Image (tube, rainbow, N blue to C red):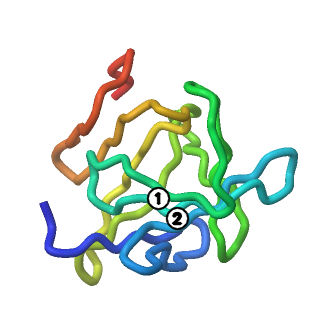
Amino acid sequence: MFASYKYHCPKCDSELNHNKRVQLNIMKDERLFTVISLNPKPGEYDYECEPQVDFKKGELLDFHCPACKENLQSDRFKDFISIVLRPADKINFEVLFDRGAGQHTTYVMTEDMIEKHGEHPKDLI
């Protein structure tokens, strides 16, 4: 799709890429639960956590920006988080991915199309 995948927080514009991965905080009961590092390529769902944790399939996770600590839950689609993909200067796409553990669905939303990756029980968009 793109030569590089640079992601940014939609709230503070901080870059979310770290060591060729997308790094986010997962909060539980308003405390840091783990730091998750995601594969940046849409449709690839491998990840690493520090500390290592096991998630219950379908459990809704609260993803937060590591810089501003804001919740990244989408305002329009509550089961998804929203981050910004910036493949080049002044080109921004909204990326939605499922907050549910083990739910592999990602949407890349451009001005004129929606690209879907993975599977989801409902086609929400």
Residue type, mark 1 in image: Ile
Circles 2 and 1 in contact, beta carbons < 8 Å:
yes
For residue 27, side relative to residue 25 (left or right): right
Residue type, mark 2 in image: Pro
Cα separation between marks 2 and 1: 6 Å
Element under disc 2:
loop
Q: From the viewer's side, name the closer residue of 27 and 85.
A: 27
Give the residue at mark 2.
10
Q: From the viewer's side, name the closer residue of 54 and 99.
A: 54
The quadrant of the picture occupied by the N terminus is bottom left
Q: How crowded is mark 1: few (under 14 residues within 10 Å), some or many (20 or more)?
A: many
Q: Position of residue 91 (x, y in %)?
A: 26, 72
Q: Residue furthest bottom?
A: 89
Residue at 28% x, 52% y: name it.
42
Q: Is residue 30 above or below residue 104?
A: below
Q: Is residue 4 above or below residue 119?
A: below
**Among the 4 quarters of the image, the one containing residue 70:** bottom right
> Which mark is drawn over residue 83?
1
Q: Where is residue 38 in the image (x, y as percent from the top left)?
A: 44, 59
Mark closer to the chain start, 2 or 1: 2
Q: Residues within 10 Å of mark 2 (few under 14, many from 20)?
A: some
